[in-house]
Amino acid sequence: MAVYRFRVSFEDYDDVIREIDIKSTQTFNDLHFAIHQATGYTPEKPSSFYVSNDYWIKNEEIAYLPNAKKSLDKITLMEDAKLSRFIDDPHQKFYYIYNFEKPLEFHVELIKILDNQPNTIFPCLFKSVGEAPRISPVLANPDENIYDETDALDLLDENDATIADEDELSELKGLEGDTENDEEVEGEFGDEFSDNEDFDDEDFKEM
């Protein structure tokens, strides 16, 4: 049984490289997870490897679809695809796209075939050069303190509350201009304002 050493590089960041050793009998799913253990990205995003030629032209697709069923037709899933089945060249290349919602693109190239090392746990990171670029908040690991869809809902709730406060303020200003309702307004809010002689409209807007 052989061990493959793959060089993984970002298409748009030439100075960031990872080299990963993995058994020939392991799957593209294992390689997919190893890449993101080495980059720090969450692997739970739809992604695909494409068997490529020397010019990185994409051919057969090997996909990672977290919610896919085994019965999908015409799609090879990473978990079912052993690496050795797709290696026809000692410098075999795979074009790899991570997260189709907002993709990052990689070149994955076989650079060496090694003998098996019985005491090594594969896949393993052989070499790391450069820091992986920070991904968009949309792609961020939910454990990180980064804005996500839940934060967006919270922001909408806060905006709704602000709009409601402004509507109430408009009603109050209308009452202040109505002499028939002066006593009612004073009775409702007078105690709250009595301790602050310098209270003005700007202070009112901040409440």
Image (cartoon, rainbow, N blue to C red):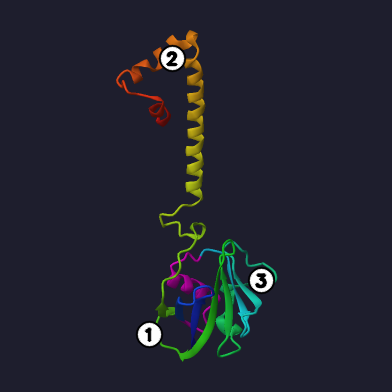
> Which stretch appears magenta?
21-43
| Residue 38, magenta (yes or no) | yes
User: Dividing the picture into quarters, in which one does residue 81 lie?
Assistant: bottom right
Q: Is residue 95 magenta?
A: no
Q: Secondary structure at mark 2?
A: helix
Q: Which mark is residue 119?
A: 1
Query: In this rendering, does residue 1 appear at all?
Result: no
Along the horizontal axis of the image, is 95 left or right of 181? Answer: right
- Note whether 166 is above or below 101 in the view shown: above
Report x, y in % for residue 151.
47, 47
Callout 2 crowding tier (Cα within 10 Å): few <14, some 14–19, many ≥20: some
At which x and y percent is residue 115?
A: 45, 91
Q: Is 78 on the left or on the right of 36, as rendered?
A: right
Does 136 appear above or below 32? above
Instruction: Give how far apart the Cα atoms at labels 2 and 1 are.
Output: 81 Å
Tag 1 or tag 2, which sits nearer the N-term?
Answer: 1
Check the picture and name the quadrant holding the C terminus.
top left
Front position among marks 1 and 3:
3
Label 3, on which residue? 75
Disc 2 versus disc 1: nearer the observer = 2
* Image mark for residue 185: 2
Inter-mark Cα distance, 1 to 3? 35 Å
The disc labelled 1 sits on which kind of residue? Asn
Distance between mark 3 and mark 2 Cα atoms: 70 Å
Q: Is residue 183 above or below residue 206?
A: above
* Nearer to us: label 3 or label 2: 2
- Amino acid type, mark 2: Val
Q: Secondary structure at mark 1?
A: loop
- Foreground pick, 8 / 35: 8
- State which quadrant residue 188 falls in: top left
The x, y position of residue 125, in whole percent, is 42, 78
Q: Residue at x 50, y 30 (%)?
A: 164
